[in-house]
Image (cartoon, rainbow, N blue to C red):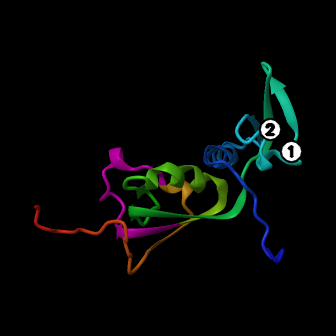
Amino acid sequence: LSGELEVELTPQGTLAEKCRAAQAGIPAFYTPAGFGTEVAEGKEVKDFKGKPHILEFAYEADFAIVKAWKGDHAGNLIFKGSARNFNHPMAGAGKITIAEVEELVEPGELDPNQIHIPGIMIQRIFQGEKFEKRIEQRTVRKRD
């Protein structure tokens, strides 16, 4: 509210596409998502088959940070659950991608068929510490 922070509203699917576009070297794209809302304010609008689309630019970042369940020292990563949704496109959006993993193993220990991101996309990798998984709590109670 004080103006110290600039916020850009972006629909979730548009964010994923902005990251993917950066990874593919596509500078911009048109999307119907967000037209007629605050998201479209000040953006170029073009009609495609009678439907308005807004121009969105690729999300290019100096750094991208991803978190994986397991990885090797070569940067190959395996994700669990919903971590597979945004980590892959985000890894390609950064000029330097840093991966934090829960378990760091030696190259060759990961099953190649299970790798979600190849090491060529990762420039730095480290094993994190003290992972708190608040939504993964096991509760045991007697049933009525």
Q: Categorize mark 2 by other alpha carbons within 10 Å: few (<14), some (14-19), many (20+).
A: many
Q: Residue at x 78, y 18 (%)?
A: 49
Assess whether residue 25 is covered by the magenta stretch.
no
Q: Residue at x 58, y 49 (%)?
A: 89
Amino acid carrying mark 1 in the image: Lys
Point out residue 75 in the picture as x, y percentages from the top left corner: 47, 61
| Image side of residue 144 versus residue 54, left or right | left
The residue beneath circle 2 is 54
The quadrant in which residue 129 appears is: bottom left
User: Compared with residue 45, is residue 100 higher up or lower down, i.e. above or below?
Assistant: below
Nearer to us in this view, 111 or 91: 91
Amino acid carrying mark 2 in the image: Ile
For the residues marked 2 and 1, what is the alpha-carbon distance in whole angstroms? Answer: 6 Å
Nearer the N terminus, badge 2 or badge 1?
Answer: 1
User: Compared with residue 105, is residue 47 higher up or lower down, i.e. above or below?
Assistant: above
Dots 2, 1 in contact, CB < 8 A: yes
Helix, strand or loop at mark 2: strand
The quarter in which the C terminus is drawn is bottom left
The residue beneath circle 1 is 43
Nearer to us in this view, 69 or 75: 69
Q: Categorize mark 1 by other alpha carbons within 10 Å: few (<14), some (14-19), many (20+).
A: few
User: Compared with residue 66, is residue 82 higher up or lower down, i.e. above or below?
Assistant: above
Point out residue 102 in the picture as x, y percentages from the top left corner: 37, 70
Assess whether residue 114 is covered by the magenta stretch.
yes
Residue segment shown in magenta: 99-118
